[in-house]
Amino acid sequence: MAQGIATASVAGRYVLAYGVKQPGAVVGRHRVEIRTGGEGRDKDGNFVETAEQLPAKYHLKSELTATVGPGSNEIDFQLGSRPAANPR
């Protein structure tokens, strides 16, 4: 089955695509990985690599899932983190 990929904007908006730029996703249940790192280009066109900032539970060891139904779907994930320890 084709892997779906989406890139989010600064505002958090995204459009999923699978296969060769087919918009959307295959209907059914899917495992989800969310990543912040990767390769790309900066504003000057230079190659840059960004380090991953999320814990592995959101990507390599992800247990996140989403069920895609027929038609339009909006599936968002609220990522949480542990609260900072209180300074003493």
Image (spheres, rainbow, N blue to C red):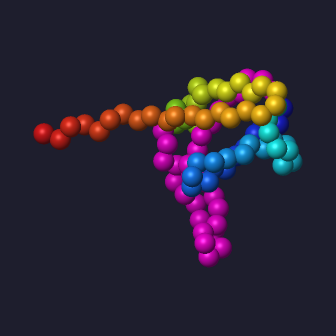
Percent position of residue 66, x then y: 67, 27
Q: Examine the rendered structure and indicate whether residue 35 appears above or below residue 28.
A: below
Residue at the spot x=21%, y=37% of the render?
A: 86
Percent x, y for residue 43? 61, 72
Q: Which image quarter is the C terminus in?
A: top left
Q: Quadrant of residue 47?
A: bottom right
Query: Is residue 42 part of the magenta span, yes or no?
Result: yes
Locate residue 40: give its quadrant: bottom right
Outermost residue toward the front in this view: 72
Image point 59% across, 40% down: which residue?
A: 34
How many numbered discs, if any?
0
Magenta stretch contains residue 37: yes
Mark yes or no: residue 30 visible. Answer: yes
Q: Is residue 22 rendered to the left or right of residue 51?
A: right
Residue at 67% in and 47% down: 14
Residue 60 appears in the figure: no
What percent of the width, then of the height, locates residue 65? 64, 26
Where does residue 36 sit, x and y in percent of width and height?
A: 56, 49
Query: Residue lying furthest bottom in this view?
Result: 44
- Residue at (68% x, 35% y) in the render: 74
Frontmost residue, 12 versus 66: 12
Residue 76, picture quadrant: top right
Residue 50 to residue 23: above or below: below
Task: Say above or below: 7 vs 77.
Answer: below
Magenta segment boundaries in residue numbering: 27-55
Instruction: Say whether residue 78 is left or right of residue 15.
Output: left
* Image quadrant where one finds the N terminus: top right
Residue 24 higher or lower than 20, as above or below: above
Judge from the rendering whether residue 56 lies leftward or rightward of residue 88; answer left or right: right
